Every structure is written in structure tokens, then in C-alpha cells.
Image (cartoon, coloured by chain):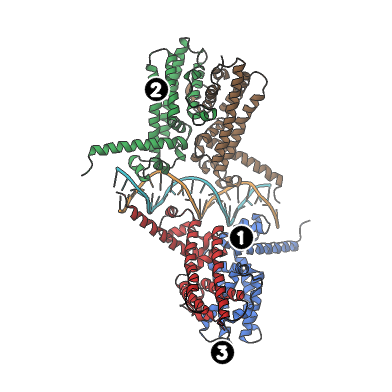
Chain colours: A red, B blue, C green, D brown, E orange, F cyan
Amino acid sequence: MPRTEEANQRIRAERRAQILDAAAQVFAHKGLAGTRTADIAAACKMSEGLLFHYFASKEDIFTAVVEAALQASGNPVQAALQRPGSPLEKLRWLLQVFLPGMWSKPGYFLVILQALNSETTPEALRERVLEQSNRNLHIYQQLIVEGQAAGEVVQGDPAVLTLAFAACIQGLGSGVLHWPRLLGLNTPPDPEVVLHMLTV
Amino acid sequence: MPRTEEANQRIRAERRAQILDAAAQVFAHKGLAGTRTADIAAACKMSEGLLFHYFASKEDIFTAVVEAALQASGNPVQAALQRPGSPLEKLRWLLQVFLPGMWSKPGYFLVILQALNSETTPEALRERVLEQSNRNLHIYQQLIVEGQAAGEVVQGDPAVLTLAFAACIQGLGSGVLHWPRLLGLNTPPDPEVVLHMLTV
Amino acid sequence: MPRTEEANQRIRAERRAQILDAAAQVFAHKGLAGTRTADIAAACKMSEGLLFHYFASKEDIFTAVVEAALQASGNPVQAALQRPGSPLEKLRWLLQVFLPGMWSKPGYFLVILQALNSETTPEALRERVLEQSNRNLHIYQQLIVEGQAAGEVVQGDPAVLTLAFAACIQGLGSGVLHWPRLLGLNTPPDPEVVLHMLTV
Amino acid sequence: MPRTEEANQRIRAERRAQILDAAAQVFAHKGLAGTRTADIAAACKMSEGLLFHYFASKEDIFTAVVEAALQASGNPVQAALQRPGSPLEKLRWLLQVFLPGMWSKPGYFLVILQALNSETTPEALRERVLEQSNRNLHIYQQLIVEGQAAGEVVQGDPAVLTLAFAACIQGLGSGVLHWPRLLGLNTPPDPEVVLHMLTV
DNA sequence: GATGAATGAGGATTCATTCAT
DNA sequence: GATGAATGAATCCTCATTCAT
């Protein structure tokens, strides 16, 4: 007697999730080109063939992983805008979400970096990432402009402040791999340290 | 009439430099695994075979490129220590060297990022990069500690400040590829914007 | 209440027939190597796994399909020999059976062609097909020789006449796929047209 | 010192020809789907990789082989039209070219059959073959119609006569593999035997 | 030194077949 | 009996590296 359709649905959903989880780790550390499908299969303890039951190609898995990471990294930025409080408090809240996220799930940030920094990334995906990058950047900038108006944020070209702020976030996401160990740190930095860059 | 030994030496040196220049661009944009030797050959307008007269392997070229980039990025940090002036002034000088360098030769920074972030990097090279990374990190930290003692730098855990400062630098080196365009900037940021993170 | 043994038998027989019918169509159009078991499963609306309850392998299905086609194409030739009337009348009767068969069930002829023309055909099957081919050929030849003796069939090397006659039949079986459309025909040709090749 | 460009041209042309020759044999006997690239490589005694220096894919090789075969089989038909003499003489000349061709190079005819009869054939190629098939068919028909007008060719629906004539040619091209042996023949049939189908 | 044809090991992907349910 | 998830051997193709010229 065959499995119920429902049981199959569940199996499929589980397997897809397993693959994405495992693949995220591998892609984060090796990039798209440097990852062998055998690596992914080993990481999720499946046969290599099964990967292709669930995804059409290695690029497809990568795309799905990056999309998931974009969701995870995009949502807090959108959410920050809706928060109550002053612009600076919104940025603070954002960092309170981001920084622990980087420390607990560095793969998500790394995989986006990989997608952004490599020309081997499928063009369509690259554009998606850039677009989101752009959206986030402009949300930062908007909050900075509002913060300047409110007297909470230092004066100066808001584009430059945005660049520095975004760089700090991205640099933390990429540096989290090695630096905490080298510096003897094991918790995410206090958001105030980063915010100090912007405050009067 | 055979070429003189001297002329041959010169040709060899030139060729190697051509290869490294071209390869740096390609590796910066595609990473080690994503770069094909054909890409490099095309970029330096040589035959693919010729690459192997000058280097033993693709990894070898990558290693040479990264070593060169490490030189370029390592020296200013060492040099900053020797500079006259206060700790903060040394950090300022460092940024005055780094930031324009990122804008004019982003490849150097990107290639180091690629080496650092990918597990496909040959282990020996990866260690070299980490070691240098570590060295730079501790120089930053030393200057920060001295700055705090001098009352120039904000109080707080120097390791955390170092982490944030290094992150900002690295984030700028990686963000320089896309963000300036997205934000309508075309010059490197004023060092003071970054320094503001550290100053009282 | 378990199904009766008898009912199971019937189901098994039905299923096998369904599979063979569907597989014949697919094999006829794609050949053994070009057909995927998924194609067959789709054509008979079963799960892929079920095919393997009824047949041991893809080759097994192919063999069964070809055997069935051999039956269908072999019997009329044997039967023609037993017919009353002159040798030419026997050949005419044969064409009267064959030609409409080609037009209504082209798959049977095509699948034999596929088996005959491809070295991917399992050796044992290939020999079966060749053997039958040989048997039919020699029946044609016998009738031609008898026809010549009776003055009904043109003089000339009977082997050559047989070759041309058989070629015409096989060519019709293979050309039926495209040519009738290209020539605006939609009924099988009059047997006399083919027989004219042999008649005085 | 590198090879001269001319020498490379020659090598490339030779290799391509070698591949096409060898591939024609293999494809003729196994079809597109049934042929492994390893088979082709073995047949032309090259490494498998080298095939892909010269052709982009297995399908590409197949296409090139079929195109060559189409040239070889198409030209005589066109040429027959230009011949001096009566329509029947033109058809006779055609057979005088075709039949020996089939006996000496059966691969050319078989490979066209494979392309025509299998749905695994790339669609574009399939259309090319059909188109040529159509062209030839209509040349046969034209000559038959003219022959009827001249009183050389039997009366009857010219489309049906064309069908039978074309079938005979195609059937010979496909039967040549096995039948001559089975019938003890080792020369192509006399064209008159085939022509008898059409003559009064 | 320089070229690019040639190799072959390795990688992504397919697909017949098995098996738990 | 029936399903479709799972496997893994085989296949097409890529690409670093070698080598004859």
C-alpha cells in the first residue's frame, strides 16, 4: 500500500529543508564554484542522486539557499522601519537582531556575501541580491537622514555614513568567522559600539 | 643570435608580472574555484600553456597573487606603528592610505577576502592570510589601547572596538564593488567617518 | 476479504497488456536506448516502480513488445502460404493484410525496425528478429519462385526480386510515419502498386 | 616554437573529419541515444575529452554527421533533375547512383533513418531531415508525373506510386544491413528491378 | 620562449532499479 | 498490488595540466 500523499508531502518538505540547511553550511564556506555536489550530499547524508530529485541543479540549490538567507536578512531591515521609537532606536533594534544572528547562524550572512562577490553567481540571482542590498542600504540611509533631522545622528553626507555603517555590518558578518577567536571574544559586540559611529 | 641570459630574465619577470596582474582581477571576481585557467590566459592574452611555464599550477598563481596582496595590505599597517604622532593619528594615517587604495585597486582587498572566506584555499596560504590578519588585528588593538590610555579613544572593551573597526575596514573593501554606485558616491569616504566609531 | 487468486491473475494480465501497449508506442518512437522507464510509466499512467512488478527490466519490456510485434507480423506471412490460389494471389493477400495494418498500427512495424537496426538491442532478441526476418524473406522468395514457374511473376534473379519486394514493404512500414502526410495520402496504397514490381 | 596557424588548421580539419567518419558508423548502428561518447572516442582512437574540443556536445556531432549524410543523399536527387534524357532515364540514373552508394556506405542512409525515426533527435535537425525528405519525395513525384505524360510510367495516382518508389529506396537502405547476407547477394540490385514497379 | 592540440581525472547530472510504506 | 522516495552506477562534459612542434 503506497504512502499517503500527505506523508509524501511531509517527507519532501523535510528533505528539502535538510538539503537547504546542509547546503547553506557548505556554500557559506566554499562558495558556489568551490562546492561539489558530493559535499552537499555528504553534509546531509543523502545520495548524490537524491539532491536532483529535489532540485534541478547545483545552481538551483544555491539559489534557494540564498533566497532563504535574503528573507532572513531582509525582513529585520523592513521590520526596523515599522518599529516605534526614534530613528536611532530603530537602528539599535536592527543591530540587536542582526548581531546575535551573525554569531549564531553565520552561514546566512556568508552565503549572501558569496553570491554578491562572485561572478560565478547566476546573473538573475546576483540581481536579486543586489536589489535587496540596495533596498537595505536606502533604508539605512533614510533612518540616518531622519536621525540627523532629529539631532540624534552626526552631521555629514548621509550617503557616506550609510556606506560606513553598512560596511561595518557586512564586515562583522564576514569577520565573525575568524576574528572573535583571534580576539578572544565569544559574544556578539554591543550594538552601541557600532552605533557610536553614527551618534553625536 | 640567442637572446642573452639577461634579456631572458627580463622577459620572465615581465611575463610573471603580467600574469599576476591579470590573474588578480579574475581571482578577485571569481575566486579560486570559480576561475578557470582559460580565464586567466584570456585576461593576460597569453596561451594557456604558457601559464604553466611560469607557474606550477593554478593554485600557485593564486598563492602568488594573494601574497602580493598581503604585502600591499600588510605594509601600511606595520608602517602606521612607526609613524610619528598620537595613536589616533596613526590610525587616521592608516585609513588615509587604505581607503584610497580600496577605491583604486579593489582587487587586492577582494582577493584576500576570497582567500580568507573559502575553504578551497590551500591550507598553507589560508594560514598565512590568517596570521597576517591576526597581526593586523593586534596592531589595531594595540593602537586602540594606547589611544584609550591617551584619552583619545572611547572607553570599552578594546577587543570589541578592534572587531568593529576591522569589520568596517573589511566591509568597505568588500562593499566597494557595488555600494558606491548604489549610493551615488565616487570617492573613498573621509577617514573621520570611520574614526568617529572610536573617538570620544 | 482478500482478492481471489483468479482476480489477481486477471489484474496481472490486464496490467501487463496495458504496459505492453503503452510501451510499444514509446519504443516505436524513441527506440530502446532513447526510452526512459519514466516515459513508459507516464504513457500507461502507472508508477515507475510498478513496471518492475511486471517486468524484470526495461529490456524485458522491450523484448516482450518486440515478441508481440513479431507474432503480429509473422503470422500473416505463414498464413499466406496456406491460402488457396496462385502464388501471386498469396502475395496479394499478404499485402492486403499488411498495408492496412501498417496504417492502423504503425508501432508494430516500427518497433521491429528499431530492434533490427540498433546494436543496443539485446543480442538474443536481435537474433530472434533476424531469424524471423529470414523466415519471412524465404517465404517471399519461395512464392516468387513459384510465381515465376507459373508465369505470373517476372523473370530475373529471385533473390533480387525478393530483396526489392521486402524493401518496399519495410520502407512502407517506416515511411508511413511521415510520407502519407507529405504526399496528401490517408489510406494505405493499393496492393497492386507494390505487386506491379513483380508482375509481368 | 609554436605550430604554424596553417598546420593547426590542417590538424583541426583532419580531426573533425576523423570524428565524423567514426561517429557516422557508430550512430548508424546505435542511434543517437544508444551511442556513448566513449564509443565514438574509441572508434576514432581519441580521448573522450578531445571530442569536445571539436564539437560542443554529442548531439552536435550527430547533427554534423546527419547534415553530411543529407548532403550526400540530397545532391544526387537534385542532380537527377538536370540530367538529359526522359523522366524514366533520370530515375534510372538516380538508382544507379543510390544503390551502389547504399552498398558501399550504408552508414549514410542508416544515420538519416535514425534521425528520422527517433523522437530523441533534436527538433531542429528532425525538421531539416523532414524537409529534405519532402523535397526528394516531390522530385520523385514530378518525374513520375512527367513519365506518365510521356507514356513511360504506369498510370495511377502519382502520390501512391511515389510512396511505393520512395519506400523501396528507403527499405533497401535499411535492409542492406542484413538481407543481402540472408539472401546470398553481394552486389546492389539492378535498378531495372526497382524501376519495374513504375514501368508500363 | 610560445602555442594550442591532446589527455584524463573528476564533476554534475540522469536513470534503471530497489525498497519502505 | 501500488507508490514514489532513495540509491548508485554510468554518462556527458569540463578543465587543469602536458607535450609535440
In this view of the protein, which residue sits in the foreground, D197 or C127?
D197
Q: Are marks 1 and 2 in contact (CB under 8 Å)?
A: no
- Residue C4: give x, y in percent of width and height: 22, 39
Amino acid residing under circle 3? Ala
**Mark 3 element type:** helix
Left or right: D117, with A45 as reference point = right
Q: Which residue is mark 2?
A: C76
| Same chain shared by disc 3 and disc 1 | yes
- Residue B182: give x, y in percent of width and height: 61, 68
Q: Which mark is residue D6?
A: none
Using the image, determine if residue D193 lies above or below residue E5: above
Q: Which residue is mark 1?
A: B56
The image quadrant where one finds the C terminus of chain D is: top right
Q: Which residue is mark 3?
A: B149
**Mark 2 element type:** helix
- Residue C18: give x, y in percent of width and height: 35, 37
Using the image, determine if residue A148 lies above or below residue D173: below
Q: Residues within 10 Å of mark 3 (few under 14, many from 20)?
A: few
| Same chain shared by disc 1 and disc 2 | no
Using the image, determine if residue D54 lies above or below residue D169: below
Q: In this rendering, does residue B12 appear at all?
A: yes
